[in-house]
Amino acid sequence: MSLQEQLDVELSKLCAANEQASHDRCQAVLLELSGDLEAHIGSGTYAVPGGYQRYLDERQRVVEQYQEVSRKGLMAVSALQEFLRSQDAVADTIRQADQSLSEHDKELAGQQARTEAAEHEVAAQRMAQEAAEQRRQEAKRSQAGHVQQLEARLETERQQLLAEHQRALDHKLKEQERLLHQGFQHQAEQLRAEIRGLQRQISQSRRQTCVLF
């Protein structure tokens, strides 16, 4: 083997060793930087609505922190690409779970909205019924007040009419007595019929009670 060939072999070994050392260092850096990310994946931190975006944000922070590390060597880009490829399956799982949870949340939100709408409708109906009942009670009280006023007025009129009949009766009784004293029997007898009629009217008026239904 010529000297050049020996040099090429040694150079190849050196490059391979450098690449391996760079790869090992980059993997160690990524392993350290992604510790929180992996812990959150394992604990289900991202298994919530919006978890996929949170995962992407934290993964991007790992990438940015990795890029700030110096002396990573020749395999820096390759190691990062390998790390990101290793996250593809996890990212897809989190994305699908997030999508499913988001749909579930939307369904729950829709159900809650429908439930609240139904409760508001029931409350509105109850308020309408209470308002209608209040109006009925007010109308009933108003009607009762009007009835009482009418009964009082009719009773007053009845008492006035009764008093008028009584005055008329008293007058005719005096007139009858005068006719009898003066010997006008026939006229007194005619007046007696009028007196009996007034007495019946007075008796009926006293028995009547003015009650409206």
Image (spheres, rainbow, N blue to C red):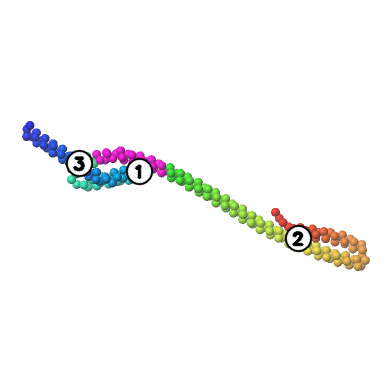
- Looking at the figure, which quarter contains the C terminus? bottom right
Which stretch appears magenta?
82-106
Label drawn at residue 29: none
Label 2: which residue?
Answer: 158
Give SS at disc 2: helix
Q: Residue at x 31, y 40 (%)?
A: 91
Label drawn at residue 24: 3
Using the image as rendered, state which of residue 132 and residue 89 is in the foreground. Answer: 89
- Answer with the quarter of the image where residue 90 lies: top left
Label 1, residues with CA under 10 Å away: few <14, some 14-19, many ≥20:
some
**Visible residue check, residue 197:** yes
Type of amino acid under label 2: Arg
Q: Residue at x 66, y 58 (%)?
A: 145
Label 3, residues with CA under 10 Å away: few <14, some 14-19, many ≥20:
some
Q: Earlier in the sequence, mark 2 or mark 1?
A: 1
- Looking at the figure, which quarter contains the N terminus? top left
Cα distance, mark 3 to mark 2? 120 Å
In-image side of 191 versus 95 (left or right): right
Q: Earlier in the sequence, mark 3 or mark 2?
A: 3
